[in-house]
Amino acid sequence: MRVILNIIWLIFGGLWLALGYFAAGIICCILIITIPFGIASFRIGVYALWPFGKTVVERPTSGVASVIGNVIWLIVAGVWLAIGHIATAIAMAITIIGIPLAIANLKMIPISLMPLGKDIVDA
C-alpha cells in the first residue's frame, strides 16, 4: 500500500514539492553561510519525493544552534514551503483518493517550518 500511495503522491504533488525544496537548497548552497540550510532542504526534498514509510524524529543532540537556525529558516524559506504544502493539501483533499495524501502533506508542515534538529528515518 505504501508503494501505491508513494506513486500517487509523486505524480500528483510530490515532484513539485520536492522541486521546491531542491530549489531552496540550491539557493541556500550558493551562499556559504547557509549551506546547513541547503543540506536540510535537500534532505527534506528527498523525503517529499517518497514520504510514505518514513517518519520524522527529533535529534537528541541538537542544541541552541539548531533553534537559531530554525528561526532563520522559518523567515527565509519555511513559510513559503509550508504554504506550498497547504495549497497542495487542499488540492489533494478534493477527491476521496487524495485525502491520505492531503494528511501526509499536512504532516510535512512541521518539518518544512523547522527542519534543523530532526532526522528522517524509516518507519
Image (cartoon, helix red, strand yellow):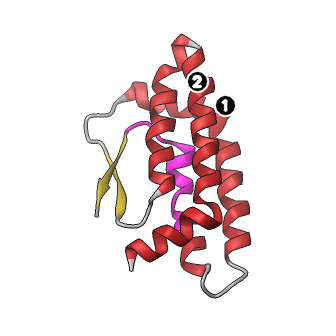
Image vertical order of residue 10 relative to residue 46, above or below:
below
> At x 43% / y 40%, what residue is drawn?
43
Q: CA separation, marks 2 and 1?
A: 10 Å
Residue 28: give its label: 2
How many neighbours does mark 2 have within 10 angstroms: few (below 14), some (14-19), or many (20 or more)?
Answer: many
Q: Write down the residue under mark 1.
A: 76
- Identified by mark 2, the residue type is Cys
The answer to whether residue 117 of the structure is visible from this angle is yes
Q: Nearer the viewer, mark 2 or mark 1?
A: 2
| 110 in the magenta segment | yes
| 15 in the magenta segment | no
Q: Position of residue 76 (x, y in %)?
A: 66, 31
In this rendering, position of residue 77 left or right of residue 33: right
> At x 57% / y 37%, what residue is drawn?
22
Dividing the image into 4 quarters, which one contains the C terminus? bottom left
Q: Which is more toward the observer, 14 or 76?
A: 14
Q: Please identify the dominant SS of the magenta region.
A: helix
Image vertical order of residue 23 relative to residue 15, above or below:
above
Dividing the image into 4 quarters, which one contains the N terminus? bottom left
Range drawn in magenta: 104-117
> At x 64% / y 67%, what residue is drawn?
12
How many neighbours does mark 1 have within 10 angstroms: few (below 14), some (14-19), or many (20 or more)?
Answer: some
Q: Secondary structure at mark 2?
A: helix
